[in-house]
Amino acid sequence: MPVTLPATIAPVASAAAADARDFTPGNIIDDAVFYDGSAMGAGEIQSFLNGKVTTCRSGYTCLKDYRQNTDDRPADKYCNGYAGAANESAATIIDKVARSCGISQKALLVLLQKEQGLVTSTAPSAWNYSAATGQGCPDTAPCDASTQGFFYQVYYGARQFEVYRMNPSWWGYQAGRWNNILYNPSASCGTQRVFIENQATAGLYIYTPYVPNQAALNNLYGEGDGCSAYGNRNFWRTYSDWFGSTQAGGRPFGNLDAIEAYPGGIRVRGWAIDPDTSDPIQVHAYLAGDATALTADGDRPDVGSAYPGSGSRHGFDSRIPVTQGGSGQVCVYAINTARGSNVTLGCRDMPFYTGSPVGAVDAVKVSSGSVTVSGWAIDPDTASSIDVHAYVDGVGTALRASGSRTDLATHYPVHGTKHGYSATLKVPLDAKQICLYGINTGRGDNTTLGCRSIMTPASRDIGRAPIGSLDAVDVAGTSARVSGWAIDPDTKKSIPVHIYVAGAGRAITADDSRRDVGGAYPAYGNAHGFSEVVDLVPGKSTVCVYAINTSGANTTLGCRDVTAADQGRAPIGNFESVSVSGRSATVTGWALDPDTVRPIAVRISVDGKVTRLTAQANRPDVAGAYPVYGAAHGFSRAVDIPIGPSKICVTAVNTSGPDTDLGCRSITTRDEGRTPIGSVDEVSVSGTTATVRGWAIDPDTARPIAVHVYVGGSATALTADRSRPDVGAAYPPYGSAHGYQTNVPIPVGTSRVCIYAINTAGANPLLGCRSVTGMAGAPVGRLDAASGGTGTVSVRGWAFDPDVKGPVTVRVAIDGTTREVRADKNRPDVGAAFPAAGSAHGFEQRLTASKGNRRVCASVVDDKGGSPVSLGCTSVTVR
């Protein structure tokens, strides 16, 4: 068997150019390397910085020369605090922070380079120092003021990685499990499934939540494609270039050749070597969290040939029993013996084949004096056939589930096909039920595969007793609903059922559809249910139900002691709503009398004029709240109403006793000529044009009406017929076609826009007026700032065109190469200075650019066709 090289190789002793083939997304840097707070001293750091920049550009302070006053930082559970001092060098700050928070000085140097290029920059800006590690500086918002400045950036950046380490469950990316990590901020670029091996790597992904795609790795020192992200690639590459391998020395390595599921267990196979010893080492296998220790001492000549200094006795091949069914994650670790740390050889999601038998009763066929059953049964703990026991009315027969069932191979591939059973058993003519059980062989218990009725109608009546059930006797007032089912085994036909209340009987037929009964007794069909309302005698009584035999003794299905409530309880209900349309009002609600399950009468009174109806409409919600009484208790009736004010009252009529008033509502019906209603939702200005939007309704008609818009003395007429679903929802009788929207010219300067709804018969109401300011002229704006980064130029400013409604496009030229940026970000300061224009006119964008000194200019084009208006120019340095 060929040897698969491990993902983790012994580290290189000194720094060398990084090779993308060595990048492991699940282990960017080893914990022992990242959390080494004594990796360098302040003097070593200073020498390192001196070697990266020999000469700083005039007027700039490079990191090797940077100094600042620092203040005290209190100790907490993440860092041991910081003793501030005057005029501390960057090297001293980095060293003291690293030792306080337990983060490698080397890792902090790489972080400063990855985020701002500070270590090698010959012309760092003030902003580069202010956001040195990117801590508290999201891509979509300004930096947190409390973490700005070089010292705070280094301290709180290091502390943040300790927050990640000590609270791993707080974050979406976690070590020791599979994580779906984005390639790029654009979700359309997709994700990579990464098993994060350690906390340091998890912290890097939380800090910069993207994994490099293959294009980024293929061009390790340049750009990939539109879906590439570079932060974690650059961290690994820079560390490798400056300090050598990101992995601690002495870590075990090896390969997980296979993880296989078999009945009752999991097989793991592979090899593992610790470079610190030629002796076999331990391998730990975790099955859904349960650990098993193995020794990798099996002979693997292929491994010995590849690593002759370690010998060949480093293989492992073990079968591990599983202790739970279902599925889970299996992980295998090579256990370190001296230097270094344990290594994950691999993880897989695997099925666990163990537990009680599974199976099915596929078919039961009944003949006179016999029954044929067939199905299948498997015990997950074994691939062998198992026993199945068949019980007919308590009398058992042992069967063997060893017949060929090729259909099972798809679902149970490791168990084979010899798991079917089929047998014909002799049974008495009056046999009732057969039950089959899968007999357990390993973990678990015997399993009921299923029970089936084997009763069938006879060719002649042999006097078998009826069967059935009294399911419920639900009392409501002085009546009760009696329900259940009954079958005579000698016939498919529905049979009589007698219900006795205090000795008085009533005969009914059990012919209601009961699918559950038909499913349990398929030879007899569904028509064997009953549900009947019977009257009760006052006080306590007994209800008994009998299934009547076609030939032979009847069967008592059951008796229940019940108590009838006293007569005269008051009805209950609800007057839910009244809706008016013209000269008619629709009254809706529900009512029931606790003394009966039957529908009751309801009176609707309009100023004393009474309409009587029965509350019998279907109301499933009422049945849900009062299940004994059923659903037939709703009412909805349209009644005539007079012009002007009137009062509608609803009364639930008692079957015996006082009625219940469900409530009254006051309404008013108006004559024609009512005043229109409406709203001015918007009056917005773009240059010398105002956009007017709103809605209007005349209560006397559902048709759209006219709207007049006045600017000074100049009028514009339009029809309010645009779709406004919100208006239709608020005024359903009128529909949605009552919106209006139009553009009207306005003069330069301040003027007043007024909107009137035009009545179909009567006065025209004013919907509202707004003061507006017409503007005209060239675009205005400013390039507030531009700064160079690593391969990027960041620009920020604002711009708008008084003649244009909405944002404009700003052209940004970098050494003559033009990019377009949308000026649509919120700038409250611009809105305050130009209230008519609003605040959505800011722009802020990071653009790619090649290294060197670059001239950055911004401009905006006049919509009237004039020359572009300059917003300003500046020079930046791109690293």
Image (cartoon, rainbow, N blue to C red):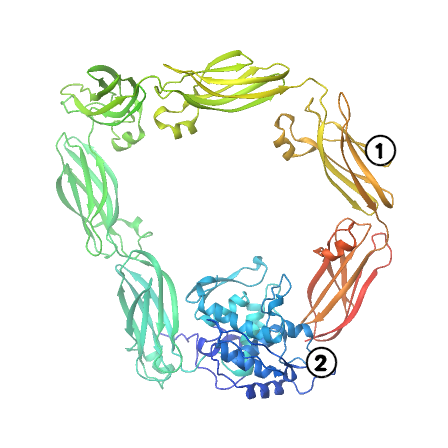
- What residue is shown with label 1? 715
The tally of labels here is 2
Which of pointers 1 and 2 lies earlier in the amino acid sequence?
2
Instruction: Tell me residue 458's x, y (percent).
Output: 18, 25
Instruction: Tell me residue 731's x, y (percent).
Output: 63, 29
How crowded pointer 2 is (Cα within 10 Å; few <14, some 14-19, many 20+) is rated as: some
Mark 1–mark 2 distance (CA, rounded to whole Å)? 65 Å
- What residue is shown with label 2? 60
Q: Is residue 407 left or right of residue 105?
A: left
Q: Quadrant of the N terminus?
A: bottom left
Q: Is 244 placed above or below 633 here? A: below
Element marked by disc 2:
loop
- Residue 514's image quarter? top left
Instruction: Tell me residue 861's x, y (percent).
Output: 82, 57
Query: Residue type at mark 2?
Result: Tyr
Q: Is 450 placed above or below 866 here? A: above
Q: Is 612 placed above or below 837 here? A: above
**In the foreground, 795 or 657:** 657
**In the foreground, 517 or 422:** 517
**In the foreground, 335 or 690:** 690
How crowded pointer 1 is (Cα within 10 Å; few <14, some 14-19, many 20+) is rated as: some
- Residue 347's image quarter? bottom left
Q: Is residue 491 left or right of residue 797?
A: left
